[in-house]
Amino acid sequence: RKRNLPMPSFYSAFLTLSLLVVLTMSSPSTDSLSTAAAEAVGRIESIIGKDEGGRGMESLVVPGDLRSAAEVLARLRPLRRASSEGGGPARVLILSGFPCCVNESPPTETDGPPGACAIARAAVGLGHKATIATDECNRGVFAAAMRGVVVVGADDDSLELETFPPEEEMKSADYERMTTLVSRVDLIVACERAGPAEDGRCYTMRGIDMNEKNLIAPLHRIVELGRTQTDGEGNARSIRFVAIGDGGNELGMGKVLNEIRSNPRIKNGSKIAAVTAADDLIAASVSNWGGYALAASAAVIRSDDTVRSQGSSVCYATALKRCVELCVPQEEDEVALLNRCVEAGCRDGVSGKMEATVDGMPLETSLACLRSIRDAALGSEIA
């Protein structure tokens, strides 16, 4: 589903679009980072790695994976599919949706939509195209969340929504649509996406089988398809998979499978642990915060690359501020987004209530984290 982006004032749009062109057209001369940029990403990783929810997620952190994932997003180039397709922007596919409120309609929780939209905003702000994919039961909430995602200078088709039915209801046309979707993308990111455990079922943290409730679309197959792709000349091209999670039952958490199963603070760990492994895993106290962190870190890296490749022709402070504004939501954006989600029936996954809280934590806790992430990003200075 295409999202239409409202037009800002002409002058503001011109200035922002001009910088967007500089940011998206620059080609970094090196894969390294300045000391300041690396330290900024490190600070952001520290912010989201604190176990605010007391669920034992600190043992799931993979040091350096936030930076690795952000470098991929910031420097993403199209993996050319066929020479006849020509050029065009890179495409990012974001998998999200955790229908853990199984007895409600919709069963969608508030952790997931904000993080997925933050990543989509960053992808579009960096010059890519983004698609969010989720279960059919989550359609209304994600459509409401995406309605307010605005990136100045982006095309109307830069952000889309795709939904899939439960696995038991998938038809050949749905699998064909999924295959076509994967063939067009260059990066897959999962943010608070339910992942199958060893027995192939997706569980809530309480051990409830969401497949049994007929809620889960087989989005994990997208990752499997991504690892068996070929380009137009028949050469293998595995699509990189980045994942964000906070409890161990999210798609991609298989990278730390042993840590999940052995962590005494993760109840039902052996049963619920998701087995699919991400290439880069971002563990956070709340998955939404991991989405903010990836967006901010990618903005820092793109700004750093731009200045290092173009030298004194670009002011780092200006490039950084503009890129963060393009890629990272502000507090008022998130308040409005969560309110739209709740109006669409979204619930806190811990309390089960239709309220603008996330994982049982008050909204201000999430806003404070977002504020700290933005401050950490904007506080970096070129070395």
Image (cartoon, rainbow, N blue to C red):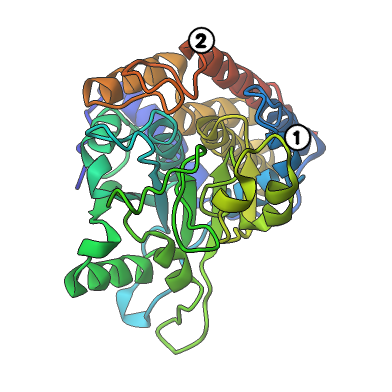
Q: Secondary structure at mark 1?
A: helix
> Who's the residue at 75% across and 48% down the image?
262
Name the image quarter holding the C terminus.
Answer: top right
> Who's the residue at 52% across and 36% down the image?
291
Say if mark 1 contacts mark 2, CB within 8 Å: no
Residue 190 image point, x, y percent: 48, 50
Q: Quadrant of residue 321?
A: top right
Determine if residue 31 is in view: no
> Who's the residue at 73% across and 42% down the image?
263
Determine if residue 326 is in view: yes
Q: Residues within 10 Å of mark 1 (few under 14, many from 20)?
A: some
> Who's the residue at 24% across and 26% down the image?
345
Identify whether 84 is placed above or below 361: below
Three-letter residue code for mark 2? Glu
Residue 101 image point, x, y percent: 35, 33
Where is mark 2, residue-wise? 364
Where is mark 1, residue-wise? 42
- The disc, 1 or 2, on the residue closer to the chain's N-terminal end is 1
Residue 60 image point, x, y percent: 70, 43
Residue 197 image point, x, y percent: 52, 57
